[in-house]
Image (cartoon, coloured by chain):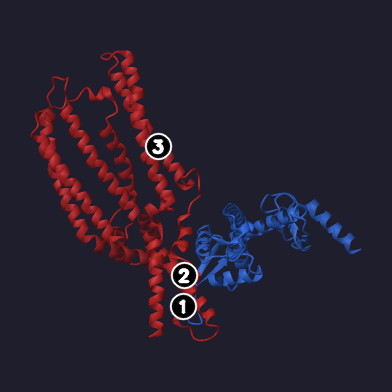
Chain colours: A blue, B red
């Protein structure tokens, strides 16, 4: 299970909403549902960030805690089955290594995993951005990322031969040209 | 001494975790070891962090274990394997539909055959309505039993391939071993799991289906053809068959690694078979059972008696084979695990 916010609150007033079991159960379940998908993207992203040297389970949890400022905490009972599932789906691959006299299982992202991670991250970014008005928050996506207008896949447009989105196949030539014109106008 | 105590503490915790793992993972020795090794590494990492650069003590290890959560919480997610889909996971759904279709089609076919066979001898309306009562009485319990089995497999997180993994992994290892000397390949080929869970599951489902038919005897038109004593004999055999089918399904859920449980279940089968022999011996002495048919002039007593004696001898031999299976189970499992381990190391290489 993903350790959601409400589960971590250990002390609360007896007359607060938190003491109402209906409220607590509903919020707990809803938070778990929100975090479940996010934890998969986050784990894939962290493994991708360590694509050369690899990363082991314990480090993934630590990194997740630090980078999300303890907002997203995955329990051990969730992480390892998730890693096993990602490995079975060939999104990551594992290698056993002995580092500092300690045997550890290091995970590496596969090309398939990177493509999926890229697409999910793009979707997640655009989702948060589009929801910003609804939730009255300010979200600013990096200019360096170009999102496919059709499927939100992140596309590296610095590559000269990029013409189509590899996920949905959309012809991007017009969009990329527009994006470049907009960037130039902004710079001026 | 301290390190020894710490290891004891970790091993005890991992043993608890191992017991709570779902059957599919327990059966896969390599995967199970991978999971437990990773958890052990995690505990050491956490203890190291708690020691804050100092020497790891038993207290750190105990604290790290507590922070891991209960064995139930650790293993819960492994049971959630599969894509939920109306209580039965999507991975099982197609097979479930196939088994149900075969069962329902068989039942409809039986009822139709009986209907046409009796079209001239039984009044049309009685014959026609008996189709529906026959279908209702046979399809409903069959549907329930088959569904319960597939729901149980889904809840336990089994995938169809888990039940055939022993054969596929051996095959995999053999194909990778193609360059290794002939003798090694031959020894790999020879080693089989002490029980074949896939065939046991098939036999269990199929057995449950047919024994229900034998117990409830849903088609009145067929029942009318036989003597009540013969029908009673069939019903008793059906009950024994049902127990046998349930034991087979239990064997699947217990997993091949549980030596004592498997031995007890095989012993249970022997007891059932002894009851079979006892039933057959009684039947040989009852002319109404041997005569079988109530309305026909043809008397198959002589042939049926021979069939019963063959069955008695066959069942007795089956009992001896099962006794041998009980005594050799442990050895066969160790050999199988050794080959399994070897095949996994080849696969990894």
Say which element carries label 2: helix
Distance from Cα at disc 1 to Cα at disc 2: 13 Å
Of all residues, the one furthest to the left in this rendering is B285
In the rendered view, does B10 fall on the left or right side of A6? left
Say which element carries label 1: helix
Q: Nearer the viewer, mark 1 or mark 3?
A: 1
Residue at the spot of label 1: B61
Chain containing mark 3: B
Examine the rendering and report whether any part of residue A33 can be seen. yes
As drawn, the label of residue B172 is: none
| Residue at (46% x, 43% y) in the render | B93
Classify the position of the N terminus of chain B by image quarter: bottom left
How many other residues sit within 10 Å of disc 3, few (<14), some (14-19) or many (≥20)? some
In this view of the protein, which residue sits in the foreground, A135 or B347?
A135
Task: Please say if B88 is above or below B31.
Answer: above
Q: Residue furthest front?
A: A15
In 3D space, how far apart are the residues under numbered discs 1 and 3 (Cα atoms)?
51 Å
Q: Is residue B16 left or right of residue A126?
A: left
The reply to the same-chain question for discs 1 and 3 is: yes
- Name the disc covering residue B39, or none: 2
Q: Nearer the viewer, residue B200 or A130?
A: A130
Q: Which is closer to the viewer, label 2 or label 3?
A: 2
- Between A51 and B159, the one nearer to me in the picture: B159
Residue B149 location (% of width, % of height): 38, 45
């Amino acid at each position: 299970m993903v350790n959601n916010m409400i589960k971590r609150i250990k002390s609360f007033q007896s007359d607060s909403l938190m003491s109402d079991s209906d409220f607590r159960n509903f919020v707990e379940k809803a938070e778990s549902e929100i975090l479940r998908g996010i934890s998969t993207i986050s784990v894939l992203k962290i493994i991708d960030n360590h694509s050369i040297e690899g990363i082991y389970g314990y480090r993934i949890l630590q990194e997740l805690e630090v980078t999300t400022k303890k907002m997203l905490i995955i329990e051990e009972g969730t992480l390892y089955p998730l890693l096993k599932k990602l490995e079975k789906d060939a999104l990551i691959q594992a290698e056993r290594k002995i580092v500092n006299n300690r045997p550890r299982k290091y995970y590496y992202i596969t090309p398939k995993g990177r493509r999926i991670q890229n697409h999910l991250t793009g979707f997640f970014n655009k989702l948060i951005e589009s929801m910003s008005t609804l939730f009255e928050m300010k979200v600013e996506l990096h200019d360096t990322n170009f999102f496919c207008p059709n499927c939100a896949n992140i596309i590296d447009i610095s590559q000269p031969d990029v013409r189509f989105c590899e996920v949905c196949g959309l012809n991007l030539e017009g969009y990329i040209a527009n994006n470049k014109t907009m960037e130039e106008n902004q710079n001026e | 001494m301290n390190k020894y105590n710490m290891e004891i503490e970790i091993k005890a915790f991992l043993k608890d975790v191992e017991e709570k793992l779902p059957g599919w993972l327990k059966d896969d020795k390599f995967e199970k070891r991978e999971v437990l090794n990773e958890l052990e590494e995690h505990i050491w990492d956490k203890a190291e962090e708690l020691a804050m650069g100092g020497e790891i003590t038993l207290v750190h290890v105990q604290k790290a274990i507590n922070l891991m959560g209960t064995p139930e919480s650790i293993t819960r997610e492994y049971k959630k394997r599969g894509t939920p889909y109306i209580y039965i996971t999507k991975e099982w759904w197609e097979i479930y539909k196939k088994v149900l279709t075969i069962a329902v089609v068989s039942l409809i076919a039986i009822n139709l055959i009986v209907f046409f066979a009796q079209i001239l001898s039984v009044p049309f309306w009685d014959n026609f309505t008996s189709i529906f009562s026959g279908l209702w009485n046979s399809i409903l319990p069959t549907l329930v039993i088959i569904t319960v089995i597939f729901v149980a497999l889904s809840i336990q997180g089994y995938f169809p391939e888990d039940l055939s993994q022993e054969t596929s992994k051996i095959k995999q290892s053999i194909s990778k071993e193609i360059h290794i000397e002939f003798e090694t390949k031959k020894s790999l080929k020879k080693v089989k799991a002490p029980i074949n869970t896939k065939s046991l599951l098939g036999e269990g489902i199929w057995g449950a289906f047919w024994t229900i038919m034998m117990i409830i005897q849903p088609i009145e038109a067929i029942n009318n053809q036989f003597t009540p004593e013969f029908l009673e004999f069939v019903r008793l055999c059906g009950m024994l068959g049902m127990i046998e089918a349930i034991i087979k399904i239990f064997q699947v859920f217990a997993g091949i690694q549980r030596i004592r449980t498997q031995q007890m279940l095989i012993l249970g089968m022997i007891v059932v078979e002894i009851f079979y022999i006892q039933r057959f011996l009684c039947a040989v002495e009852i002319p109404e059972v041997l005569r079988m048919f109530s309305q026909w002039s043809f008397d198959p007593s002589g042939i049926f008696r021979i069939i019963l004696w063959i069955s008695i001898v066959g069942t007795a031999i089956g009992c001896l084979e099962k006794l041998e299976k009980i005594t050799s189970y442990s050895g066969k499992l160790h050999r199988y695990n050794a080959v399994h381990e070897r095949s996994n190391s080849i696969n990894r290489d």
